[in-house]
Image (spheres, grey):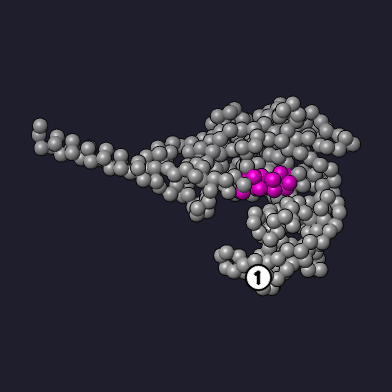
Amino acid sequence: MTRRSITLSVAGALVVALLAIASLFPVPYVVYTPGWLENTLAEKDGSPVVQVADEDVPTYDTDGQLDLTTVAVTSADTELDLLTVLHAWFDDERAVVPRNVVYREDETAEESREQSARQLARSQEAAKVAALRHLDYEVSEELVVAVVFDGMPADGVLEPGDVIVEVDGMTVDEPEEVAEIVEDREPGDTVDLAIRRDGEERSVTAETVPAEDDGRPVVGFAPDRGYELPFEVSIGIDERIGGPSAGVVFALAIYDRLTEEPLIDGNHVAGSGEISGDGEIGSVGGLQQKIAAASNAGAELFLAPRGNCAEATEANSGDMRIVPVDTLTDAIEAVDAFTDDPNVQLPACQ
């Protein structure tokens, strides 16, 4: 064996050994992978995904597919090795993301699921509001208890969904106002709240305790903006789905169920985008993986937040058309135009 052959053999053995050692140590990254799609115009357990509880409100049959898109993300309790990350890095349908971009330090899988479920609930609520307002229904705003933290003074005193009427006798309209009132005291002081639960007003009192991070007085709940809908709309989807990014699709599904003229009308449309109660559409994570999933499933049109255009242009979209949207109105108009003529000229990401 020549000296060169020996050198190459030794070098190769060292590379293999180094890779083997690297595979034993975790690296601070997670991987995004194209997830599954769920048709919001379909039925789940024998009932439409979108349902209206009020029999006096007419609903209409829908036709076609309107898919929300998902991303499979490395679980918070899973650590990846270097070889797994490198394999994902060279896969053009997956993405490698720093772990601290997705999860807090020491965040557990259960905490991640709970946060994702809360985001989904807020997303659905905002989608209902946006769709109903677009249809000229009156939707009033109110301040509600979004989250009650276990083991805190508010636990057992307040419940998620409670409407906050007053704090220490003062009317509050913004979540920040609640925090300002609570923090204007010493830990151990009490806070009096007037709330409305199940249509009945009541008064409750909770003690403040020092926050773990900075010692400021807290009660242990998170207020958020809520809405009073003119009638109840329910959205039944796979319980594995979470996060805020299906808002625009939820809003379109509600709109299609409540309008006599079909919107999707037999086409296959998918999309992603966080939505506000005013119908503004915001950017989301994992858009390239969502586009790839929709294209692989045969979707013809994909609605993407305009703020994600840079990522959308680099995604594996195949023949699927990608349309950037800023508002629910943009999304409805784009789908309506596509339904009338699949070859119509529509906005595109540049």
Whole-percent x, y for residue 100 in the image: 49, 52
* Camera-side residue of 232 and 93: 232
Whole-percent x, y for residue 285 in the image: 56, 46
Residue name at image x 73 percent, y 48 percent:
126
* Camera-side residue of 119 and 293: 119
Residue name at image x 82 percent, y 61 percent:
203
Region in magenta = 115-127
* Camera-side residue of 101 and 255: 101
Q: Is residue 152 above or below residue 336?
A: below
Quarter of the figure with the C terminus: top right
Q: Is residue 307 left or right of residue 223?
A: left
**Magenta-span inclusion, residue 121:** yes
* Camera-side residue of 191 and 184: 191
* Residue under label 1: 187
Whole-percent x, y for residue 330 in the image: 70, 43
Q: Residues within 10 Å of mark 1 (few under 14, many from 20)?
A: some
Whole-percent x, y for residue 260 in the image: 83, 32
Quadrant of the image occupied by residue 234: top right
**Magenta-span inclusion, residue 106:** no
Quadrant of the image occupied by residue 132: top right
Residue name at image x 72 percent, y 28 percent:
45
**Residue 125 visible in the displayed image:** yes
Quarter of the figure with the N terminus: top left
